[in-house]
Image (spheres, grey):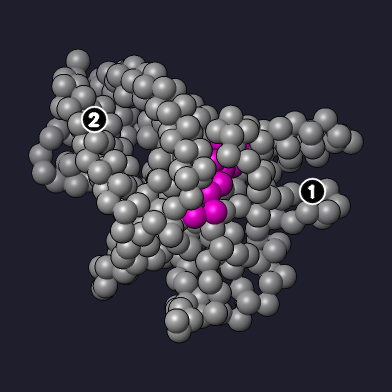
Amino acid sequence: MTDFSAFEGMKFIYPFLIIFMIIEFLVARENYEIKDVLAGFGIALGSSVIASFTKVIAVVVVFQWFFDLLEPFRMRYLGYSSIGFAWWAWALAIIADDFNYYWHHRISHTIRVLWAAHVPHHSSKHFNLAVSIRNGWFVTFYKPIFWVWMACIGFEPVMIGTALIISSVYQYFLHTKLFSSIGILGFVFNNPRAHEVHHSSNVEYLDKNHGGILLVWDRLFGTYQDLLSGVEPKYGIRKDPETYNPIKLNTHEFQAIYKDVKNSKNISHALMYIFGPPGWSPGNGSMTVSQMQRNNPVSLEYSSEKVFEKKAG
């Protein structure tokens, strides 16, 4: 059985993250709205309570079960029982974790029922460190599925859990306007400038820059987008529930799905409302992101290499 004491020790970093948030609030007060921040903390409280159970189950039970179950297979066909804890194993674990995160995140934007779970993170009309803690209450119920393969091939469960925490801490600092660029490193590593795009509801920016630590995956799989000249980011979601209630922020899209399914004329339409892309409708009464972007002249005119130039003054 894996020793999880190191994994437990990682939790002590979180008070330091709150301190950074307070500093940002004091330095850039204009980027904060008190009601929005309180809504964020309400969402964070609920997600923390749920995650305290689901993450333990995922790491201690699910990952460990698959790790132990396939150990004989690894010994027989791969010649090892565990990848171990060498420095290169940690490097591989972090890269694998980031690959998982990219696909988990991208799919959470393209399957409506998963978007319903993820949407609370995008519900703020602001961009600050308080947004980083707005994690949907239902995401942790399906997120571990994308990481199971790592336990199957021999990554220690505690290593998987630690890689998840490292990624979360890194991503925390993506949600700030105090600095936007990290120079040439921004070509490879995710940064606030790129993440501003991801949190914007402009048609040109929808479903872009899904990476966690690395932007390599977005560049490789065609979802990278830089800030565009003349297209200032508008944060939030296109169908804003107009509420600061954490419960409503976590359930409004599920309620919309239920309403659409209830009014569906056949089972195929009902299934598309659940598992199809957000915005799908049988008669194109509403449009998906890809449909909107195909019909948007700015999306067609600008390439991902164009840069947003802030207005003087």
Callout 1: SS: loop
Q: Residues within 10 Å of mark 2 (few under 14, many from 20)?
A: few
Q: CA distance from mark 2 to mark 1?
A: 43 Å
Q: Residue furthest left?
A: 86
For the residue marked with disc 2, what is the amino acid? Lys
The residue positioned 73% from the left and 37% from the top of the image is: 256
Dot 2: element: helix
Q: Residue furthest bottom?
A: 312
x and y, in percent, of residue 295 in the image: 72, 70
The residues colored magenta run: 115-126
The residue closer to the viewer here, 211 or 199, is 199
**Tag 1: residue type?**
Ser
Residue 11 circle label: 2
Residue 17 is left or right of residue 224, and the answer is left
Looking at the image, residue 142 lies above or below residue 177: above
Q: Is residue 135 visible?
A: no
Queried whether the magenta region covers residue 263, the answer comes back as no
Residue 274 left/right relative to 107: right
Percent across and percent down for residue 59 are: 32, 24
Task: Tell me which residue sits at (52%, 43%) in the image.
Answer: 35
For residue 211, side relative to residue 186 (left or right)? right
Q: Quadrant of the C terminus?
A: bottom left
Query: Residue tagged by mark 1?
Result: 281
Foreground label between 2 and 1: 2
Magenta: predominant secondary structure element? helix
Q: Which quadrant holds the N terminus?
A: top left
